[in-house]
Amino acid sequence: MVFVENAFDAGVQEPLYRARSGNFTDVESSFFSITPVDVLSYQVAYQSRNSTITDFVVRNNDNVTNVSWSVFTGATTINASNVTVLNKTSSVFVIVETNYTTSGVYTTTGTANSSTQKDNATGVAVV
């Protein structure tokens, strides 16, 4: 089996998959979408009695240059203090520590924003 990776632009893509055995060939296709910005690997990496550490990767898949991020902790929203300038296919690793005043289960969300697009991922913090 051979896999060929193509660098697609943002938008809906339709790659073709070909399988050959002797004189027989079969072709399949599938659709997927590439967004201009992605939130990848979102996780609540550490939890204690009153704090958490959340991390995720923001990736630029298109020609978007100015990207910002935010984290909703379940109690408050933490925004990036500066806009990050990312070249196409570049990424930034985000780490956020949150201190909680009340114990409980909190739904958390990491968001990446560009001027035209946004993406987010959700996790759970137990403190």
Image (cartoon, rainbow, N blue to C red):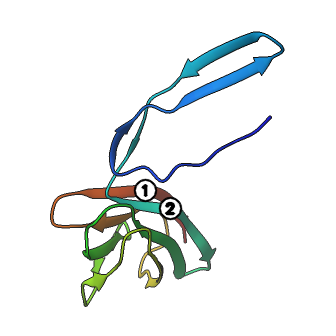
Return the residue nearer the eye: 70 or 108. 70
Left or right side of 28 for 3:
right
Q: Residue at x 26, y 75 (%)?
A: 65
* Quadrant where the N terminus is found in the figure: top right
Res 7 label: none
Quarter of image, res 11: top left
Of all residues, the one furthest to the right in this rendering is 22
Q: Position of residue 78 (x, y in %)?
A: 30, 79
Res 121 label: 1
Q: Residue at x 62, y 73 (%)?
A: 45
State whether residue 82 is above or below residue 78: below
Callout 1 crowding tier (Cα within 10 Å): few <14, some 14–19, many ≥20: some
Left or right side of 30 for 68:
left
* Quadrant where the C terminus is found in the figure: bottom right
Return the residue nearer the eye: 88 or 52. 88
Q: Position of residue 51 (x, y in %)?
A: 52, 82
Of all residues, the one furthest to the front in this rendering is 23
Residue type pointed to by label 2 = Leu
Q: Position of residue 32 (x, y in %)?
A: 44, 36
Return the residue at label 2.
Answer: 40
In the structure shown, which secondary structural element does the residue marked by tag 1 occupy? strand
Quarter of image, res 120: bottom left
Of all residues, the one furthest to the bottom in this rendering is 81
Left or right side of 58 for 112:
left
Return the residue nearer the eye: 48 or 4. 4
Residue type pointed to by label 1 = Ala
Asked whether the residues under the numbered discs 1 and 2 touch, taking CB atoms below 8 Å apart as contact, a structural biologist would say: yes
Residue 104 seen: yes
Q: Residue at x 43, y 80 (%)?
A: 100
